[in-house]
Amino acid sequence: MKILGISSRINHPEFGKGVVTNVTSKHYWVTFIENGLETIDIDAEFEVIEAAEDDVDTVSFAEVESSLVQILKRWSDVTEVVHIADKWKGGKLILEPGDTNLKSSEVPIDTFFHKITMVRDRLRVMEQKINSSNLKEQEKIDLQQYLTRSYGSLTTFNVLFKLKEQQFKGQKK
């Protein structure tokens, strides 16, 4: 039996996909995408996705965890938790038509906010896909400009966000 090194990637039948972050004489410490840190026996049943051999522990667990979080944010559809500003919780968005003979429409503001954050998350995924694509550099720049303008158009809704760092940001002037 060959011992896996740190940064080896595995697929465990119970815990799913993960990265080996530490190795002891009897156990692997594995950070799983969906289950967090788990300790499994070295001789446990799992599929090796990518083996890193003879790797010495030269990074701390915190550095590995930070790297894993960055990788997950970049390559997955996992999104951060975004909270609506407290003053809007439980509120409603009322759409009044210009014609008074027509009925107005109400939408729970939490539902509207969820839709807005989904648009933002999808724009971010599109941005990542553009950046990692085989497009020519000028084509990437052109598409990035469209995305930036889209973010700019959505800044109207920044008032709904609890945290400023999660708001839409358009083009810097």
Image (cartoon, rainbow, N blue to C red):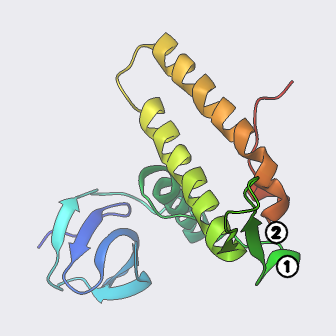
Position of residue 49 in the picture relative to residue 56 (left or right):
left
Q: Position of residue 137 (x, y in %)?
A: 48, 14
Vertical relation: 131 (above or below) 106: above
Residue at point 75% right, 36% down? 170
Q: Nearer the viewer, residue 74 or 140?
A: 140
Secondary structure at badge 2 equals loop
Vertical relation: 141 (above or below) 154: above
Q: Position of residue 151 (x, y in %)?
A: 68, 40
Q: Nearer the viewer, residue 31 or 85?
A: 85
Residue at point 17% right, 84% down? 43
Residue at point 62% right, 23% down? 145
Q: Nearer the viewer, residue 75 or 64?
A: 75
Position of residue 97 in the picture relative to residue 129 (left or right):
right
Amino acid under disc 2: Lys
Vertical relation: 152 (above or below) 28: above
Question: Residue 16 sits in which quadrant?
Answer: bottom left
Residues under labels 2 and 1: Cα distance? 7 Å
Task: Assess disc 1: are there few (<14), some (14-19) or many (≥20) residues with their C-alpha within 10 Å of its C-alpha.
Answer: few
Q: Mark 2 highlights which residue?
A: 162
Residue 4 seen in this snapshot: no
Residue 37 seen in this snapshot: yes
Question: Residue 29 sits in which quadrant?
Answer: bottom left
Q: Position of residue 14 (x, y in %)?
A: 24, 87
Q: Mark 1 highlights which residue?
A: 86
Amino acid under disc 1: Asp
Q: Position of residue 165 (x, y in %)?
A: 79, 56
Which labelled disc corresponds to residue 8?
none
Secondary structure at badge 1 equals helix
Residue at point 85% right, 59% down? 159
Identify the image quadrant of the C terminus.
Answer: top right
Please say if the residues under marks 2 and 1 sit with CB atoms less than 8 Å apart.
yes
Task: Assess disc 2: are there few (<14), some (14-19) or many (≥20) residues with their C-alpha within 10 Å of its C-alpha.
Answer: some
